[in-house]
Image (cartoon, rainbow, N blue to C red):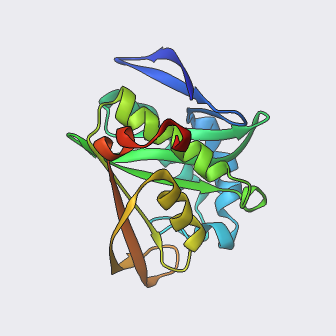
Amino acid sequence: MRPSAANTGNRPAVTLTTDRLALRPTTPADAQRAFEIQSDWDVTRMLRMAQFPPDPDDMTVWFGVHRQEWIAGTAFRFTIERKGHMIGLVDLDEIDGEEGELGYWLEKPSWGQGYAFEAAQAVVSFAFEQLGLARLKSGHAADNPASGKVLLKLGFRPEKTMRKASRSRGEEILHQSYSLASEAWRNRSGADR
């Protein structure tokens, strides 16, 4: 991960780059592309808190508050770009003290190519090495094992499976939760990161 910074109010905006991706802070202009991606049921059914079908006005409002969240330090949301084209989003939210939650989603054509791992790895590194968080949590729908593989490869450990409400599906689903401590992240060999 190679970070670069630009000032956004009280907190610098950071762009992260990987071998194949650029992760930059979201902007309100990203709302339309996010709406297009989340209009695919196969994508949105895996997002517990997303609405399906998505509402373009709600999406615009949500993207409109991202900068304020960044400045406040309560959430850091990155647009995932491949060759200048938005393919998804990766974020840290629910930041409270030394903990935060990792989330990510990709357009369906980008599934299975390692982009989720690559983007999430850069943001986990950002969380622990630049923000100084001590612990991250994450999770996925039990019927989305590909997301679980990403989390395990990052070093997350399963915690528990529970039933949680899914806004996108309109019902309760089985949800697998995970966590990763910064100490465990730092103790991993350099080859794993």
Quadrant of residue 27 within the rendered picture: top right
Residue at 44% in and 33% down = 126
Residue at 59% in and 50% down = 117
Q: Which of 101 and 62 is in front in this view?
A: 101
Quadrant of residue 157 within the rendered picture: bottom left
Q: Nearer the viewer, residue 8 or 140?
A: 140
Question: Which corner quadrant holds the N terminus?
Answer: top right
Q: Where's residue 67, x and y in %?
A: 44, 32
Please give left or right for residue 35 compared with residue 151 in the image. Answer: right
Q: Where's residue 169, x and y in %?
A: 52, 80
Residue at 48% in and 39% down = 123
Q: Where's residue 158, x and y in %?
A: 37, 68
Figure check: 89 above or below 173:
above
Q: Where's residue 100, x and y in %?
A: 32, 47
Q: Which of 91 and 41 is in front in this view?
A: 91
Please give left or right for residue 112 compared with residue 163 in the image. Answer: right
The residue at the far left in this view is: 97
Whether residue 69 appears in this view of the structure is no
Residue at 38% in and 29% down = 129
Question: How many dots with numbers?
Answer: 0
Quadrant of residue 146 within the rendered picture: bottom right
Whether residue 157 appears in this view of the structure is yes
Figure check: 91 above or below 13:
below
